[in-house]
Every structure is written in C-alpha cells, then in structure tokens.
Image: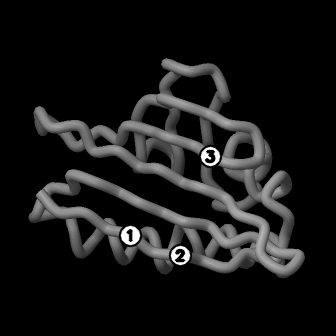
Amino acid sequence: MKDFKKYYSIDATPDEVYLALTNPVSLQLMTGEKAEMSTETGSEFSLWDGSIVGKNLEFEDGKKIVQQWYFGDESNDSIVTIKLHLDKGSTSLELKHTNIPDDDYDAIVEGWNHSYMASLIEFFDE
C-alpha cells in the first residue's frame, strides 16, 4: 500500500471549491459524468459514473472533505483527505490519499493529476 500527497492551486475561493466538490450538479458539470454526492457523514458517493465509489467520513464547510475510497476486496481503508486553504485570493488544495493498493497506485496518481484535479482547475478557469 502506498500514499500520495500533493498540493494544487485553484483559481477560486475555498468555499467555491468546497461547493464544487460536494454538490452533485457541479461534480457532473465538472466531469461530464453522472455523480452522486451528499455532505451527510456516512453517506456513499459515486463519481465518474461509478468509476470512483466510497463513503463520506467527514466534512468541514469550506475547509475539509474526508472520504473512504473502495478498492474491490481490499481490507485496508483507502482514505482521501482534501484540505482547502485560502492563498492570495485563490485556494491551495492539499490532497492526501492513503493506503492505495500498489497495483493501482500509478493509475490513481494519473487520475488525480489529469482527470480529477485537471477537471476542477478547468471548471474554474472557464
């Protein structure tokens, strides 16, 4: 199991980024795919038409999102923590994804950089 941590700069406020990441309508607009999301702790979510699924563990409005991502039969929890920080009028997004299965690591990192975060950055650039 491996961990991934990276910072991204988003041209929007932390509140705007938080809303984009927790609202199913904005997620669907951002990705172009069906999204199911709720800010209710313990609720399950689905992104990219079921390509990413898991459980919402914790929310702090405008500041933090913690999710458990499911990887088939893996017994160890894969936890995604997103922290949002105001940085000179934009947002510094801190991403930490722990316990990524070794066989999935490269694809997950590629997905974070070139799909998930690229879509989020582009969403606010338009």
Q: SS of the residue at dot 3?
A: strand
Crowding near the residue tagged with mark 1, few <14, some 14–19, many ≥20 C-alpha atoms within 10 Å: few
| 31, above or below 50, in the image | below
Amino acid type at mark 2 = Tyr
Crowding near the residue tagged with mark 2, few <14, some 14–19, many ≥20 C-alpha atoms within 10 Å: some
Q: SS of the residue at dot 2?
A: strand
Q: What residue sits 62% from the left and 34% below the top?
A: 59
x then y, percent, for residue 5: 38, 69
x then y, percent, for residue 11: 81, 77
- Residue at which label 3 appears: 64
Q: What residue sits 14% from the left and 56% below the top?
A: 101
- Residue at which label 2 appears: 7
Amino acid type at mark 1 = Lys
Q: Which mark is residue 5?
A: 1
| Real-space CA distance between mark 2 and mark 1, rounded to the nearest whole angstrom | 7 Å
Amino acid type at mark 3 = Lys
